[in-house]
Image (tube, rainbow, N blue to C red):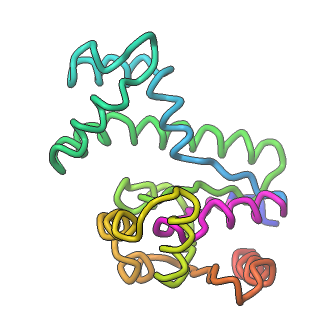
Amino acid sequence: MSGRLIKLGITGGIGSGKSFFSGALRAKGVPVFDSDAEAKKLMVSDEGIILALKSLLGNDVYVNGEINKSLLASYIFGSPQNAEKVNSIVHPCVKKAFLSWADECFHSGHGIVAIESAILFESGFDDIVDKVVMVYAPLDTRISRVMKRDNTTEAKVLERINSQMDDDDKMSRSDFVIENDGIKPLDEQIDVLFSRLV
């Protein structure tokens, strides 16, 4: 491994198996930063975010130190502009947390780290990574996975898929594509990925 840190961005649509791929990377010793989990943590711990959300939505956005999820969700889904306002508060803090975490990993001896985000491009997280890996699965596979996982209907899954960036757009902006279709062995694809990084 070279004397520099390689930062990977992992993205992919709902049901593509991003978390499954992240787990496979972790098993090979690559630390993975979960941007969703970190954003949720920061929203209740970062003073700057708390103050900004209260000034945007009022004090009711927090109840007993926890996010008022229904209030926040109804605001975010009210319009794309509303979502952008919330994102502009949260995403810069997540970026900062990732870069600080990545630095710690590097000093602990890691040569590769990754950040997992469904909205990697939309949130601008692609600006802070060296390479983007898209996890891809066929549409019917994604639908059946999410229906099973979330105990929901096909129509609901399709609605969520259609609200995300198109797979072709993601693919054209990614450096590597991992096919998580249950046919191509994941380990082999990860080995190829590593060989192209070093």
Foreground residue among 131 and 16? 16
x and y percentages locating residue 37 in the rendered image: 56, 40
* In the image, residue 121 above or below residue 194: above
Name the residue: 40% across, 78% down: 167
Where does the C terminus fall, quadrant-wise?
Answer: bottom right
Task: Give the quarter of the image for residue 173.
Answer: bottom left
Foreground residue among 16 and 128? 16
Task: Give the quarter of the image for residue 153.
Answer: bottom left
Name the residue: 22% across, 16% down: 58
* In the image, residue 195 above or below residue 21: below
Magenta stretch: includes residue 11: yes
Q: In the image, 102: left or right of 78?
A: right
Q: Which residue range is magenta in the image?
A: 6-28
Magenta stretch: includes residue 33: no
Foreground residue among 157 and 82? 157
x and y percentages locating residue 39 in the rendered image: 48, 37
Number of marks in the image?
A: 0
Where does the N terminus fall, quadrant-wise?
Answer: bottom right
* In the image, residue 78 above or below residue 117: above
x and y percentages locating residue 195 in the rendered image: 77, 81
Foreground residue among 185 and 69? 69
Name the residue: 29% across, 40% down: 88
Name the residue: 30% across, 38% down: 73
